[in-house]
Image (cartoon, rainbow, N blue to C red):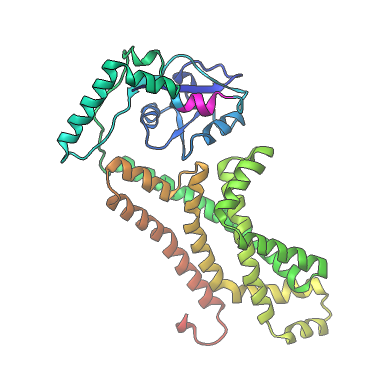
Amino acid sequence: MIYAETLAVRKDSDARYLFDLAGKRVATLNQTYAWDLLNMIRTISVVSYEGNDEPYDDLEHGRVDGVLLDNIIAERFGCVAKHPNVMCLKDDVSRGAYAAGIRQSYPELGRAIDAAIEAMRQDGELERILRKANLWDFRQTDQRGVSVSDPVVKTFDWDMFGDFVAAAIVTLEISALGFLLAVPLGVALAISRVYGPAWLRGAARGYIELFRGTPVLLQLYVMYYTLGYVILLSPMTVAVLTLGLNYGAYEAEVYRGALLAIPRGQSEAAKALGLGPWQTLRHVLIPQALRIALPPMTNDFVSLLKDSSIVSIITVIELTKRMTIAAVELRGYLVPGIACALFYLLLSVPLSELARRLERRLARDQRPHAL
């Protein structure tokens, strides 16, 4: 069966050919023929998706400037009533043929399948089946422009290493920004739960239970495909917000435990010195609570660093996503898997060592060697 790569753009776009989208963001499915075509054009920023409908949703809302996918997908998911502002361009970007894959150790099966398909083609049964499924078009009898090429197996070279470095920077950026959001949010929630009035304690607890009790994957989907369309947010922004809001709930419980661990005498001493409630919190309680909370904070940050791998579902290419892309290109997971693990270690181990040094500096028990 012959298929075509169909380019879809918004109706207000001036683009009529793929090269008109130079410098733009074009979406496709990961590790497809369209993916290979787009990656040949260095001036195009390729955005990878896991599903058929999501690229056209993002095209409709302006997150990408074009979508390149098989004509069968484009006709059923892209240029439909659900996407009134999307149009599929008539000219085929490229053509190819679908094929069945079997093990090389079964050559007889391959010949039998070829013979059966040829017989169906000769007596018209294949055409009748494709017409019934609304898959028959002029391309099935016009094979001009059909591209057939041997797959290229890449090697782990410096270009691929550079891709991993870029993905590691994205991972670190998401994690750092997410944790910078989670820490003050967690402190505010902890103070609300310990010292706030009843309504504020209830609201803080409700927030914490909501974000701790639902999967972060679900939160990413809701943020990206609902709130992210009301207020147009980039994938990176949604990733940082979601991870920050999620880990803020966990940090809140860490800081609440640290605040409750401070002896009551500290508050009483602050009152005796004439400090008000907010002065006591700022100058006496919070500094001590942060020192107590430092070890679990470090653990949470390392966990956030690893949990950032889940943001690949909203088209962010971080370390784990880069590993899966490289694994397909290399036809194996061993080398990219080791590379991915080493990069995660290079990010997490220095952070753990920095936290240990801070713990030693802040230690008050005369036994710093135990830390």
Q: Is residue 178 left or right of residue 269?
A: left
313 above or below 272? above
Q: Quadrant of the N terminus?
A: top left
48, 79: nearer the viewer = 79
In the figure, residue 62 lies in which quadrant? top right
> Does the rendering let one see residue 288?
no
Is 79 one of the magenta-colored residues?
Answer: yes
Name the residue rendered at 28%, 16% in the picture: 123
Q: From what the image shows, is residue 216 above or below residue 238?
A: below
Position of 101 with respect to 368 (left or right) is left
> Observer-nearest residue: 44 or 269?
44
Residue 332: image location, x then y, percent: 27, 47
User: In this rendering, is residue 24 above or below 235?
Assistant: above
Relative vertical location of residue 34 with respect to residue 155 in this rendering, above or below: above
Tell me residue 223's x, y (percent): 62, 46
**Quadrant of the image occupied by residue 60:** top right
Which residue is located at x 39 percent, y 32 percent?
A: 35
The quarter of the picture where residue 4 lies is top left
Q: Would residue 282 appear left or right of 344 to someone viewing this image? A: right
Q: Main secondary structure of the magenta part?
A: helix
Magenta span includes 135:
no
Q: Depth check: 136 or 87 in front?
A: 136
Task: Give the residue displayed 77% in from the left and 85% down from the top.
Answer: 269
Residue 147 pos. (x, y %):
30, 21
Extent of the magenta region:
73-80
